[in-house]
Image: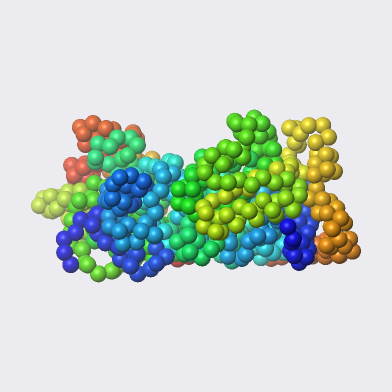
Amino acid sequence: MSQKTMRDAINEALHQAMEQDESVFVIGEDVAGCNGSAGDVGAVGGVFGVTTGIYHRWPDRCIDTPISESAIVGAAAGAALVGMRPVAEIMFADFIGVCMDQIVNQMAKFRYMFGGKSRCPAVIRFSAGGGFSAAGQHSQAMYQIMTSFPGLKVVVPSNAYDAKGLLLSAIADDDPVLFFEPKILYQEACEVPDEHYTIPFGEANFVREGDDVTVVAFGQMVPKAAAAIDELAEEGISCDLIDPRTTSPLDENAILESVEATGRLVVVDEAPPRCGLTADIAGLAADKAFASLKGPIKQVCAPHSPTPFSPELEAAYLPDGNKIKAAIKATLA
Amino acid sequence: MSIPTETLSNAYRSMKTIREFEERVNAEIMNGQIPGFTHLYTGQEANAVGVCAHLDADDTIISTHRGHGHCIAKGAEVDGMMKELFGSSEGLCKGKGGSMHVADIDRGILGANGIVAGGPPISVGSALAAKIRKNGKVAVSFSGDGSVNQGTCFEAMNMAVVLQVPAVFVIENNYYSEHTNISYAVGCDDLKARTEAFGFPVFVADGADFFAVYEAAGKAIEHARAGNGPAGVFAEQGRYHGHFVGDPQHYRGEGELDDLRENHDCLKNFRARMAETGELDAATLDAIDAEVMAEIEQAVTAAKAAARPTAGQVTEDVYINYGAGA
C-alpha cells in the first residue's frame, strides 16, 4: 500500500493484467510511442503516460496504431470476438465521434444480434472530461451518452483506488466495457494497494454518509462534491454522497435507499443537462421514490453549451463547489 | 492447378445451396413469410465459395449486409439460417439478428453486418489476434464496391499493412453501391490500383468463375498465412437481384439482368468446365442439385413450424452478466 496517482494506479492495473493473462494486450495511438522514429520505442506510453513501461516488457502485446480510431476499436472488438482481452486506448473521449459505429453498432450488439453465442471482452479506455482549457473537442465527458446504449458497460472512476480495482474488473469482464478516466484526476493520489484487487460493477461507493440530503456525483465531480459537503457539515448539514462508479450497470438500490432516507436529492455531473446522467438519476428517483421526496430534485451540471476554451469561461461552465452547495441548500429551503 | 474432386463437389454444392437458398428466400419474402430488410447474393456465389474453400474452421470471415452466401460458404447451417430469417427463436441467432446479422462464431463467422464497411476493422482485429498467437490463421473480410469508399475500410487496410497482420480483403464488385454505379461512386478508374496503393497485393478474378476466384483467393490467402501481411482479392460479378428484395432496379440497363443470368452464371460455368474435364459427371451434379433442393425445402418447412420467440426473450443476451445493477 502506498500513495499512487490515478495514472500510476491504472498503469499498475495494466501491468498486473498483462502479467496474469497473455490474452491481454494494449492497442492505441502512441501506447508505445516513437515507432518508426529515431526515439526509443516505448518511451511515450500514451499521451498521458498511462501505458508507460508496457512495451518494454511485452513488445508483442503493445500495439501502436495509426490515428485510426474506428480501426482501433474495430481491432479490439474483432480480437475480443476470437478470445483475446484487448485494452484499447482512445486518447480523448471526444474522439468517440469518429469511432461511434464500431462501439455502438458493432461491439455493443454482437452478443445480442448473434443470439448470445459470442462474447466480446474488450475494454476501451478514454481520457475524459473538462478542466484543462482543452476546449470543445478535447473536454467532453461522453460517458453519459454511452450509458444509453444497451450492451455496453460504462465505468467512471473518481479516485486512484477505484480506478485500479475497476479496471482490473473491466479487463476480466466478458462484456465490452468503456472505461472513462477523468483526466483532471490523473495526478490525484490516494492509498492504493500494491496487489491485484477488483471492485465489482454496479456497486456504488458511499463517499460520505449523512441524513439530510442525498448527493449523487460522477467522476471528477465526486471530489468536488465531497469538499462541498465537508464545508456544509460545518453549517450542520449532513449529506450522503454516492459515487455510482459504474453508470451501466447502475446501483439503483443504493440511490433509492438513500433518497428514501433523506427525502432530498441533488445530482451532479460535468456534462450538459439534456438526456444526461443528472436527468437520468432524477427520473429514477421521481419514478421509484416519489413518495419519499420532500421537495424538488436539483440537478447540477454544465449548461447546454459546448465546453469553452478560456479558463474564466470554463470555470463558469463546469459545476463547482459553490454550485453544489447552493443546490444542496436549495433542497433544504 | 489441380483441385481435389471432393473440393470440387463441395464447392458446387455450396454454390448451388446459396443459389437456391436465396431464390427461395426471395419467394418467401414475396409471400410475406419473412419480415424485415433482406439483400440477396444470387449471382455472386463463386466469390464466397472460391474464397472459403481455402479456409478452415478457425480462420474467420466477416461479411456484409448481403451475407447469406458468405455464411453458407463458411459452413453455417442452412436450417438455422432459414429459421433465423423467419424470426424464429430456434434460429441461428435466436431471432435476434435476422438476415443482416447471421453469425456463427464457432464456425469462424464473425457475422453478416448491416453497416457498410463495418466489418474490415473487426477483421483486422481477428487477424491481429492470429498474429499475436502465432497460430497461422487468417481473417477474411468481404466488402462490396460500396464499402471501399468508407473511411473504415481505408483505416482497416492501412492498419493491416502497418501491423503486418494476416488480413485478406475480398472486394466484390457487383457494380452498384445500392442504386449507384461504381463508375460514379469510385472516383478513380482503377480500384485495384487504388487498393494496392495501401501496400498489399490484390489478385483479380472473374466472379462468375469459381476457378478464377479459387486461384486468386488461394494466392491472397497463402500470402497472408505465410506472414507476409495483408492481401486482397478483387472479384467482379453482378448480382441477379436488386439491392434489397423489392428494389425496382431503375438503374439497370436494358437487357442487363438477362445478360447476367444468361452469360455470367457460376453454376453454368462450373458445369461447362466439368463437362470439359470430366472431373465430375452430370449425374453427380444432378444428384447434388436434387439434394440441395430437398435441403432447402426441408429448411423452409422447418422454419415455418419452428418456435416463435416470446416477449420474455427481448432482454436476454444483452450482457453475459450485468451484475447487481441489472
Q: Is residue A201 visible?
A: no
Residue at 42 percent across and 62 percent down: it is A85
Residue at 72 percent across and 62 percent down: it is B78
Taking the view exactly as shown, the residue that stands out farthest to the right is B283
Q: Is residue A101 left or right of residue B84?
A: left
Residue B223 coordinates in the image, percent (x, y): 57, 54
Q: On the rendered image, what quadrant is the N terminus of chain B found in? A: bottom right
Q: Quadrant of residue A214?
A: bottom left
Residue A221 coordinates in the image, percent (x, y): 25, 48
B292 or A197: nearer the eye?
B292
B192 or B99: nearer the eye?
B192
Q: On the rendered image, what quadrant is the C terminus of chain B found in? A: bottom left
Q: Is residue B59 visible?
A: yes
Residue at 66 percent across and 31 percent down: it is B183
Residue B257 coordinates in the image, percent (x, y): 80, 39
Query: Which colour scheme appears in the figure?
Result: rainbow
From what the image shows, is residue A264 above or below residue A18? above
Taking the view exactly as shown, the residue that stands out farthest to the left is A234
Residue A64 coordinates in the image, percent (x, y): 38, 50
Residue at 48 percent across and 64 percent down: it is B134
Q: Quadrant of residue A275?
A: top left
Q: Quadrant of residue B280?
A: bottom right
A262 or B28: nearer the eye?
B28
